[in-house]
Amino acid sequence: MIDYIIVGSGLAGIAFSEKALQNNKSIFVFNNQSQNSSKIAGGLYNPVILKRFSEVWKANDQLELLYPFYKNIEQKLGIKLDYKLPLLRKFYSIEEQNNWFTASDKSNLTKFLSTDLIATKWDFIPAPFYFGEVLFSGYVDTSLLVTSYKTYLIQHNAYEEETFDYSELKIYSDYIQYKNIKAKHIVFAEGFGMLSNPFFSKLPLDGTKGELLLIKAPNLNLDVIIKSSIFVLPIGIDLYKVGATYNWEDKTNTPTEAAKKELIDNLKELIQCDFEIINHYAGVRPTVKDRRPLVGTHPIYNNIHVLNGLGTRGVMLAPAMANDLFNLIENKIPLDKNIDIARIKNFVSSFHQNG
């Protein structure tokens, strides 16, 4: 018997897998590649909500876990994942500058917002009102992470690529069995695919489609992340990720011309040099209406768990949420009520009503 079956190998599944392995637990991961939001994500992490100049929920705690988590995987797999880059928010008015300085005076934001205005040093990005710099920012190469971690699991005979058949899951008081595998626990980390999961489909997961472009712009010469209505993220050899769009209606992974046009229009407003579109990606982020993750144990079955709803900030949230779920299961440490699925009263009550 193994300790954990994990369903899903995006950011959430990888984070929980890694937490379990670090604690000498045995795992087996199933993934059907139905959701690709982790693989095509921008991978940005930053501790500030730049639309409102406010702190990301529990940003400090998340950053404390983020750095050692990705560094450990880098060392284990012999790859480079974490790129620490300044993030510059372009200002469009004196009022925005003033709002920035007001925010930087707040105790929870002082360490994250530089009070030095940065003048443009890039010929092709006019910025008459300058930029503000966010500290402790960067990006994770999520595509490399997902593909490399999959290879690692395969090498350790701990991975199967197949559509998980929920009808094959047998639940007992002290273990579960899926086909020929017995495990003490199962963790569902399926992203938007959770809506097909009979144990957790009633949770309020509200997927948000995002699209981004990969462009080549030899004259841009950016060595920082630029954020305006879009982000422009340098990933080397004159290549940049440009994103992202938000669509609450379309739940497919198919790139659209409308989103492509939106991104191109916003990019042309930001930069004044030629660029070539190399690729166009789309995926559905697992978002939640109250903007908090969905973490916890099933109301009826104490060996079935969920780790989902990481939304647009999966890179930052995944290590912290995996840590919290592991501590709940293994050490009986209660979850923060903001992430615990027990907060979803109608979800919990529906199972108790149905027996």
Image: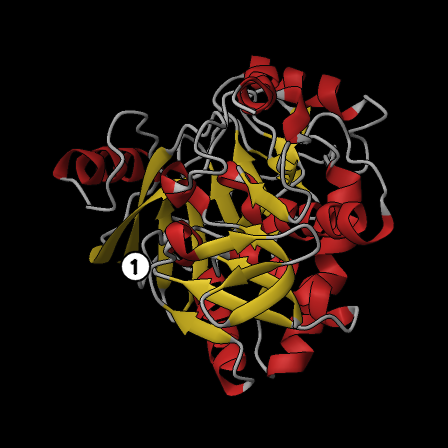
Across and down, in percent, residue 41 comes to 42, 51
Residue 41, relative to residue 61: is it above or below? below
The residue lying toward the viewer, choosing from 296 and 199, is 199
Question: On the rendered image, what quadrant is the N terminus found in?
Answer: bottom right
Across and down, in percent, residue 233 comes to 45, 52
Residue at position x 59%, y 55% in the image = 186
Residue matched to label 1: 217
User: Can I make out residue 164 in this image?
Assistant: yes
Name the element at disc 1: loop
The residue lying toward the viewer, choosing from 238 and 211, is 211
Question: On the rendered image, what quadrant is the C terminus found in?
Answer: top right
The residue lying toward the viewer, choosing from 349 and 45, is 349
Q: Residues within 10 Å of mark 1 (few under 14, many from 20)?
A: some
Residue at position x 49%, y 35% in the image = 200
User: Can I make out residue 124 in this image?
Assistant: no
Residue 279, relative to residue 300: is it above or below? below
Q: Quadrant of residue 156?
A: bottom right
Residue at position x 59%, y 67% in the image = 182
Outermost residue, top side:
95
Residue 217, relative to residue 312: is it above or below? below
Amino acid beneath label 1: Ala
Q: Is 69 left, or right, of 344 in this rendering?
A: right
Across and down, in percent, residue 343 comes to 66, 21
Across and down, in percent, residue 258 comes to 16, 33
Q: Is 111 left, or right, of 235 in this rendering?
A: right
Outermost residue, left side:
257
